Amino acid sequence: MKTNIAALRQEYLLASLNENDLHDNPIVQFKGWFQEALNTFVDEPNAMTLSTVDELHYPKSRIVLLKGIEENHFVFYTNYHSSKGKQLTHNPNASLTFLWKELQRQIRIEGQVIKTSEEDSVNYFNTRPIESQLSAWASHQSELLQNRETLEARFEALKLQYQHMPIPKPPHWGGYALIPSYIEFWQGRASRLHDRICYKKTADTTWIIQRLNP
C-alpha cells in the first residue's frame, strides 16, 4: 500500500497553555512539565534533540539524554572527541528540543554550553552500568569504523582488562551543561492554533514571558 505522507495529520485536543498557568521561572515550569511526562509514562521523557553547528555553519542534530538540571543548567554527557564535542568546542551555541507526543507538547531550549566539572563527570560515570562504562572506552565516537567485529573485539578486550578493577572515566568523556537564554513551551491545539509561550533572558538575567503566533 502506498502512504500519502501529506495526508498524515492529527488534531491536538488534550490541553491548552495559558500565561496565568505558567511559573515566572522557566526552569520551574520545565520541571513541572517534566514531572507530568513522568507521571504519564511518556517513553524516554529525557530524550532530547541536541542541535549544534559545525565549522562550516551547517546545523547538526542528534538525540541525547538529559541527565540532570544542575544550577538551572541542562546537563548531558558524551565523548568530547565526538562530532558534537568538536562542534561545541568550535561554537558553544546549541539548542535542545523535547517532544512528548503523548502530551502533545514540545519544549525548545537555546543557550550556550560549557563543560561540567571533572568531579561531576567522574561522579556520574561511576553510576553508569559497567557495560556503558566499557563502551565509553571502546567507542572512538564519530570516527570511521571498518566493521562491527572490530568494535566488539575492542569491547571484549576492555571487559577482560577491567574484570577485577574499577573502570576509570576516560579523559575524553564527560559532561556538558547548557545555560539557557531562551525556553519555549508549545502545547498542541485544535486547527493548528497551537499555544506557544517563550521565556527570554534579559541583560539583568531576569526572564520576560511572551506569547508567539503558532
Image: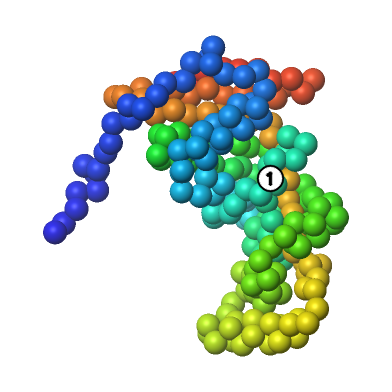
> Which residue is painted at 68% across and 71% down in the image?
130
Is residue 106 toward the left or the right of residue 91 in the image?
Answer: left
Residue 109 percent location from the top left of the image:
60, 36
Residue 201 percent location from the top left of the image:
70, 24
Most extreme residue toward the top, as rendered?
A: 20
Question: In the figure, 164 relative to 28: above or below?
Answer: below
Examine the rendering and report whether any part of residue 57 can be seen. Answer: no
> Which residue is painted at 66% across and 49% down in the image?
67
Residue 134 percent location from the top left of the image:
69, 74
Residue 77 percent location from the top left of the image:
69, 56
Q: Answer with the quarter of the image where residue 153 lies.
A: bottom right
Q: Answer with the quarter of the image where residue 25 lies.
A: top right
Count the numbered circles shown.
1
Q: Answer with the quarter of the image where residue 12 lies.
A: top left
Residue under label 1, please give it. Answer: 68
Q: Quadrant of the C terminus?
A: top left
Q: Nearer the viewer, residue 148 or 38?
A: 38
Q: Quadrant of the N terminus?
A: bottom left
> Which residue is painted at 24% across and 48% down in the image?
5
Q: Which SS class for mark 1?
A: strand
Question: In the figure, 69 relative to 164: above or below?
Answer: above
Give, as a three-letter code, the residue at label 1: Gly
Question: In the figure, 69 relative to 210: above or below?
Answer: below
Badge 1: residue crowd in 10 Å (few <14, some 14–19, many ≥20): some
Most extreme residue toward the left, as rendered?
A: 1
Is residue 149 toward the left or the right of residue 122 in the image?
Answer: left
Q: Which of 193 and 57 is in front in this view?
A: 193
